[in-house]
Amino acid sequence: MSTYYVCKIPNEKGKHEVHKKSCENKPPTESLIELGDFQICSDAIIKARTIYSEVNGCYNCCFPCHKI
C-alpha cells in the first residue's frame, strides 16, 4: 500500500496531479492534500475526483493512471 496525495495547484493542462508519497517529483508538502493509503493509483484518482474534477496521475509515480 502507498500513501497518495493530490496537488492543490493544477498543471499547465489544468489537471491536479496525484502522486505517491515516495515520488521524487511531487510538489512541496504545503501544495499537497493527503488522499490516504491505497493499493492502486486508480483508487487514489477516484478519491482525488471528490476534491477536484480534473485530475491526472503523475507520469513518474502513477504511470498506469497517467492520461496524456
Image (tube, rainbow, N blue to C red):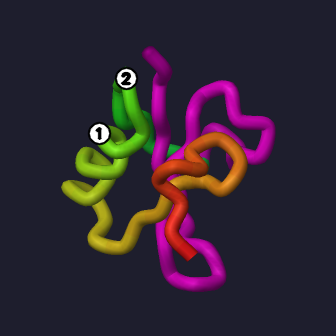
Q: Residue furthest bottom?
A: 13
Who is closer to the viewer here, 15 or 66? 66
* Helix, strand or loop at mark 1: helix
Circle 1 Cα neighbour tier, 10 Å, few/some/many (<14 / 14–19 / ≥20)? some
Mark 1 residue type? Asp
Q: Which residue does the image show at 31% across and 65% down from the upper left?
A: 52
Q: From what the image shows, is residue 3 above or below residue 66? A: above
Q: Which residue does the image show at 57% across and 84% down from the upper left?
A: 13
* Helix, strand or loop at mark 2: loop
- Numbered range of the magenta stretch: 1-30
Who is closer to the viewer here, 48 or 63? 63
Name the quadrant containing residue 33: top left
Position in image of residue 16 (x %, y %): 48, 65
Q: Which residue does the image show at 60% across and 28% down from the upper left?
A: 21
Is residue 14 one of those drawn in magenta? yes
Who is closer to the viewer here, 49 or 60? 60
The disc at residue 39 is: 2
For mark 1, what is the residue?
43
Mark 2 residue type? Gln
Q: Which residue does the image show at 59% across and 50% down from the upper left?
A: 63
Q: Residue furthest top?
A: 1
> Can you say which quadrant of the picture contains the N terminus?
top left
Q: From what the image shows, is residue 52 above or below residue 41? A: below
Q: From what the image shows, is residue 53 above or below residue 24? A: below
Position in image of residue 62 (x %, y %): 56, 45
Mark 2 near mark 1, Cβ–Cβ under 8 Å? yes
Circle 2 Cα neighbour tier, 10 Å, few/some/many (<14 / 14–19 / ≥20)? few
Q: From what the image shows, is residue 58 above or below residue 12? A: above
The disc at residue 9 is: none
